[in-house]
Amino acid sequence: MTARDFSPHDFTRAGYRGLLEALTVLGYSPATFAACRADKADLVLRHDLDFAPDLALPLAEIENELGMSASYFVLLDTPFYSIRDSQVRTAIKELIGLGHDVGLHFDAAGAEDTAEALDKAAFEQCGILEDATGTAVRMISFHRPAKALLGRKEEIGGRPHTYQPRYFNEMGYCSDSRGLWRFGHPLEHQAVAERRALQLLTHPIWWANDDGGNREAALDRLVARLGHGIKPAIAETVTGYDPATGRIAE
């Protein structure tokens, strides 16, 4: 697969497999955040679980079949799922069982706007997640990060985070924000052209079914699952989503 071969309709499980295989052909090898080297063809796979951990399982299985591991970041305080739900904890433990890491997807907007308060909230949430999953939380990603957090050098909650310069500036960074490669396809990224490390962020809701890039259909399934009352929360998470129509503005 090349970037030219990839279309929005390839936001499917098969498309995800093809993307990972294409990066492998280019010489990329999976790496953890801790072990990645900015000047090498290291591939750091990151998934932010904004909507439901079980949606990530099809992608986790593909990665496992390809001999790759990824980092899955879990929210604690969200209208979409709860770490207290036994089915949610089961899905997370399945991710771990497939050889993947679990980190905290931290919503800094829910903490007081001081460095001390952010550290305290992140540390406490990591402890809750560790107790629920029985595994150590080694990494944090920010949920809908404020610009001030992008490139922040300091750790938070005693742990590194995905927007530190090492991971966000010194290596390539590519995201499927809103179910689109809004800043270019990963295979066309400058870091890939130079065979430097790449942090690839994907959100499983856009890939976990075979709608072929139909973002509204993915969100419609979420509404059917959780009820129409969830639509305002979707609008807060997906920029451009209209609760009245269920459509996403470009």
Image: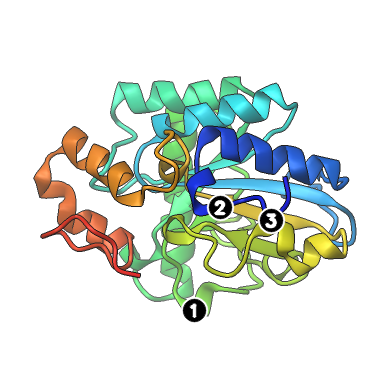
Foreground residue among 239 and 236: 239
194 in relation to 79, above or below = below
Corner quadrant of residue 103: top right
Q: Residue at x 51, y 21 (%)?
A: 94
Disc 3 is placed on an element classified as loop
- From the image, state whether disc 1 or disc 3 is nearer to you: 3
Q: Which residue is mark 1?
A: 147
Q: Is residue 199 left or right of residue 204?
A: right
Q: Vertical placement of 28 versus 188: above or below?
A: above
Residue 184 found in image quarter: bottom right
Q: Residue at x 44, y 55 (%)?
A: 179
Nearer to us in this view, 186 or 104: 186
> In this figure, which residue is indicated by the disc labeled 2?
7
**Real-space CA distance between mark 1 and mark 3, rounded to the nearest whole angstrom:** 29 Å
First reached walking from the N terminus: tag 1 or tag 3: 3
* In the image: residue 172, left or right of residue 181: right
Of mark 2 and mark 1, the one earlier in the sequence is 2
Q: Amino acid at mark 2?
A: Ser
Can see residue 91? yes
The residue wearing badge 3 is 3
Name which residue type carries label 3.
Answer: Ala
Q: Position of residue 203 (x, y in %)?
A: 48, 48
Task: Name the quadrant containing residue 158.
Answer: bottom right
Secondary structure beneath label 1: helix
| Residue 215 spot, x, y in % from top left | 35, 50
> Among all residues in the image, which is located at the extreme front?
5
Q: What type is the residue that disc 1 sits on?
A: Lys
Residue lying farthest to the bottom in this orientation: 148
- Compared to 188, does 100 lie above or below? above
Which residue is painted at 29% across and 38% down in the image? Answer: 81
Q: Quadrant of the C terminus?
A: bottom left
